[in-house]
Amino acid sequence: MTPQNKLLKKECLPTFVETLVKGGKLLYAPTKENERIEFKLIENFSEIYLDYIQTTKSIKSIVFPPIEKLFEYVADKEHVEIKDVNLNTIPETIVFGAHPCDAASFKVLNAVFTWDCNDEFFLTRKDKTTVIGLSCKNHDDYCFCTSVDLNPGSTEGSDILLTRIENDNYLAEIMTEKGEAVYKLVKNLFEPAPQVDKNAFVTQLPKLFDLNDLRGKLSFEGLSWMQQSLRCLSCGTCAYVCPTCSCFDIQDIGNQTKGKRVRIWDTCALPQFTLHTSGHNPRHFQNERWRQRIMHKFSYEPERLHVYGCVGCGRCSRACPVNINILENLIEISGGNK
């Protein structure tokens, strides 16, 4: 479809959200509690907090849950019965107020989960999810979306992108058929959009390194992987807050007669991730695991999937208990200047 722009006045925003909530879909939005900002299931507009730079965790769990049942089984001595998950029970969902980095992460996840086969669990959740994004008014020292070919007003991944403009009104960019379906539900709340320079209303984030320079200087050997990884505790926090990390493990929970198979988040930062049954571990040392994380996101994924495995949200650096800053490391490798 051809994208279209509309104006949503600030006094109409609560009605807009309340109408979506009453429409029967689950609605996740940023909330603030004790200085902690998280996406949560909301029922009223008053619960939403939009003046944020970044949430602690991403919206990844909405389309790729931390633990997800794949099937159940019941067995006796003669046969095994497999009970598949009814994907039709996955609810229609709206994500409201996600920043462009989070919205763009769905493209990365989609590339992973459709690479060698189509993952029906991910695709069903993604197809049933509508993203109403929100451009960034502010940034902090951890943000670097402009260095990974995005920007604070990027429409990538958003079905509708809202940008706060003059008088706290919102420019609504309707980008997809999903977005148009939402627009038609509340069409009476929108007005023709004025001619505005959207970039004048989003935060100005300088580009801190060049992706081509970075890829050109990445190498399996010869870089300071050891020095960069010395502080790492192998805790995996970076992967669990990351909107694009997609590693998982498969486990069976139950006994010989009944149980379920589940998919759970995993991470290449953990020593056990590559541990073989024989006891051999090809990534025994932390510098090898740190190298894998950087190479995967900025070399292997672009080469194989034609996407970068990073959207520049900065969550990994904010959450790291020993203050490892991925941005500083990428600048060091690429030769850029902060």
Image (tube, helix red, strand yellow):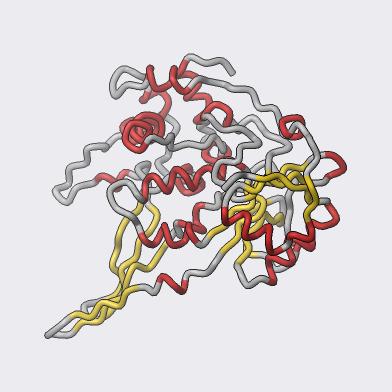
In which quarter of the view is residue 187 placed?
bottom right
x 26%, y 44%: residue: 274
x 54%, y 34%: residue: 312
x 36%, y 73%: residue: 85
Q: Is residue 19 above or below residue 78?
A: above
- Viewer-proximal residue, 27 or 127? 127
In which quarter of the view is residue 183 placed?
bottom right
Whether residue 286 appears in this view of the structure is no
Q: Is residue 8 above or below residue 22?
A: above
Residue at the farthest front position: 2
Q: From the viewer's perspective, is 16 left or right of 120?
A: right
Residue 265, given in percent of the width and then of the height, sits at: 40, 54
Quadrant that contains the C terminus: top right
x 35%, y 19%: residue: 223
Residue 219, given in percent of the width and then of the height, sits at: 32, 21
Residue 224, given in percent of the width and then of the height, sits at: 38, 20
Residue 231, given in percent of the width and then of the height, sits at: 45, 32
- Viewer-proximal residue, 337 or 112? 112
Q: From the viewer's perspective, is 132 left or right of 108?
A: right
Q: Is residue 269 above or below residue 81?
A: above
Q: How many marks?
A: 0
Whether residue 332 appears in this view of the structure is yes
In which quarter of the view is residue 307 placed?
top left
